[in-house]
């Protein structure tokens, strides 16, 4: 996987932090980001850990978004 140094922290943390089910880098051609699937009860702790480690390592403040999966696209009448 080829990724920029500042986003490498996000990708690395996303692979071994507590509660992580899986993680990957995406959108590298447009600056990229990391997406992680995390156990619901670990989401806030994961976000805090990643934010602190990212800021400590690359001296930038990341934007992190906790969201949940939904049923997906459908027709609404």
Image: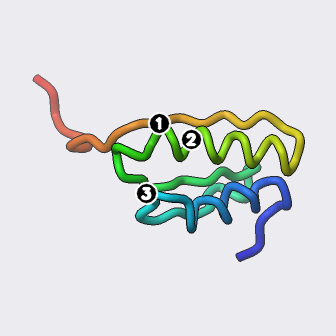
Disc 1 from disc 3: Cα separation: 14 Å
- Secondary structure, mark 1, is loop
Residue depicted at x 34% and y 39% = 68
Asked whether the residues under the numbered discs 1 and 2 touch, taking CB atoms below 8 Å apart as contact, a structural biologist would say: yes
Q: Say few, some or many: other residues with alpha carbon within 10 Å of mark 3 (under 14 / 14 to 19 / 20 or more).
A: some
Residue 26 image-quadrant placement? bottom right
Q: Which quadrant holds the C terminus? A: top left
Residue 43 image-quadrant placement? top left
Asked whether the residues under the numbered discs 2 and 3 touch, taking CB atoms below 8 Å apart as contact, a structural biologist would say: no
Image position, residue 20 (x, y; %): 46, 60
- Secondary structure, mark 3, is loop
Placement of 2 over or under 32, stated as above or below: below
Residue depicted at x 77% and y 66% = 3
Mark 1 or 3, closer to the camera: 3
Q: Say few, some or many: other residues with alpha carbon within 10 Å of mark 1 (under 14 / 14 to 19 / 20 or more).
A: few
Determine which residue is flagged by label 2. Answer: 47
Residue depicted at x 60% and y 38% = 48
Residue 41 image-quadrant placement? top left
Residue at the farthest bottom position: 1
Of 49 and 15, the residue lying toward us: 49
Q: Earlier in the sequence, mark 2 or mark 3?
A: 3
Residue at the farthest left position: 77
Classify residue 9 as left or right of residue 13: right
Of 24 and 58, the residue lying toward us: 58
Determine which residue is flagged by label 3. Answer: 19
Q: Say few, some or many: other residues with alpha carbon within 10 Å of mark 2 (under 14 / 14 to 19 / 20 or more).
A: many
Determine which residue is flagged by label 1. Answer: 66
């Amino acid at each position: 996987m080829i990724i920029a140094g500042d986003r490498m922290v996000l990708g690395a943390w996303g692979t071994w932090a507590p509660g992580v089910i899986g993680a990957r880098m995406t959108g590298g051609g447009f600056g990229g980001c990391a997406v992680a699937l995390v156990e619901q009860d670990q989401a806030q702790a994961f976000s805090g850990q990643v934010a602190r480690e990212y800021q400590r390592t690359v001296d930038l403040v990341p934007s992190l978004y906790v969201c949940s999966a939904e049923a997906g696209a459908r027709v609404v009448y």
